[in-house]
Image: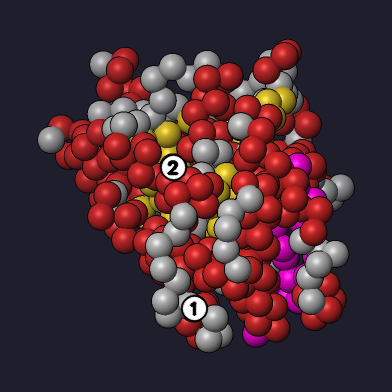
Amino acid sequence: MERYDQLYRLYDDFDTKRLRAYQEFVDLFPPVDSRVALEHWQNANEKLTEGKDEIREAFPATGETFAEIAARATRDQAFTALDLLSKHGHSVNALVLDVDETLRSAGETDNEIPRETLYLLTELHESGVPIIVCTGQTLENVKGFMIQGLGNEIVHSGRMSIVYEAGTGVFTPGHGGETKQLLYEELDEEIREVFARVRSRVLSDAPDHLRRGCHLQGNEFNVTMKPNFETGSAEAKRVIDDALVYMLDLLGESIAEQVDIDGEPTQITDWTRAYYAGADSEIRTVLEESGELPTEAGEVPGQLDGFFERIDVAYYEADAAEIGSLELNKVVGVQRALDVLGVDEPFCVVMGDSKSDLRVMKWVEEESCGLAAAPAHSSRDVLDHVIRTDELVYEPGQAADILTTIATLNRLARLDSAG
């Protein structure tokens, strides 16, 4: 209880709110060519130093660490960090981060990663914590905005990895032959052939309204239809719902053509829709609401079922319909990234909002190798998991709250280790 008593004293006896304001101003003050502004910065820096010195004197054995905690973390963040350390007994040695609607949030942050979040990521990286960006986006897209946000030096530091297209590839600059790993090339040829068939037909065979209303994301392997409307809009929802039904049917046809399954086209369609409706409640809802859910599909033939068990169909409302491999997911990608980064005994914080992120969250729980955090607008299953485990739910666009808590946890862990 001594550490808790010290934190109570820290936040009760010192003006930590003022100290945080000075620290934020000093850290995030933009470079300007103004003598008056520079004098203002220097004054704030002097006040910050004075405040930290008071804490250093009050806590002779822990003052340096407590001064940093007081200047960067709120009372709630500090006590949450200590609770997590007491519960798990580990510092965090890897960040596993989704991007869209996790680090950045459309409508809340102009779809950019907030400056404070980027600063904290840089701080954690410089403290020795590797970063794994884990996303459904293409490599070039992710690499571009991460270089823009964090800088080329961090992205190519050898301590950052990008798991892209939800786990079909891993890019870890600075690791020689392991820098880029195309995990989809390790799949069986028959699975790769199904994806090639779907990809070759997905736009050319699509109905006119889907060709006009959707585009293909430029993936290396997964097949992803995205709306030509604003994500989240009513128009986007309608076209993605239609795209989902179309892609289910195309998948069933492509598998049936390859393995020569007997059955009428309508029967193959019914088998495919029924299987994936049973596997995913969101897909079932879309099929029911559009009147496309078969009522009597019958038993799925073994050959077809064998393919279905290895191929994922994902639906993201008003955002995307996607066909991917169940053998390649974010968990597989994260595991490979950790291996390349040399994190032998990981204890990660996983931040995400969707079902693909939930798989990673469940993996770290099962292996007792991490924590899960999610924005409040996440899917219900993700929120249920996060609330049940460590309750690390944050407001949209406020990923910095969790990163501050993790940085505080690590400071406290180093303090305990030194003691």
Q: Are marks 1 and 2 in contact (CB under 8 Å)?
A: no
Q: 9 above or below 106?
A: above
Quadrant housing the C terminus: top left
- Identify the disc placed on residue 293: 1
Label 1: which secondary element: loop
Magenta range is 214-234
Amino acid under disc 1: Leu
In-front residue for pair 325/12: 325
Residue 103 in sight here: no
Amino acid under disc 2: Val
For label 1, the crowd category at 10 Å Cα-Cα, with few meaning under 14, some 14 to 19 and many 20 or more, is some
Residue 184 on image: x %, y % = 65, 34
Q: CA distance from mark 1 to mark 2?
A: 30 Å
- Looking at the image, which residue is at 62% across and 54% down? 256
Q: 362 above or below 341?
A: below
Is 202 included in the stretch rendered in magenta?
A: no
Quadrant housing the N terminus: top left
- Looking at the image, which residue is at 71% across and 21% down? 179
- Identify the disc placed on residue 360: 2
- Front: mark 1 or 2: 1
- Looking at the image, which residue is at 79% across and 42% down? 140
Q: 7 above or below 414?
A: below
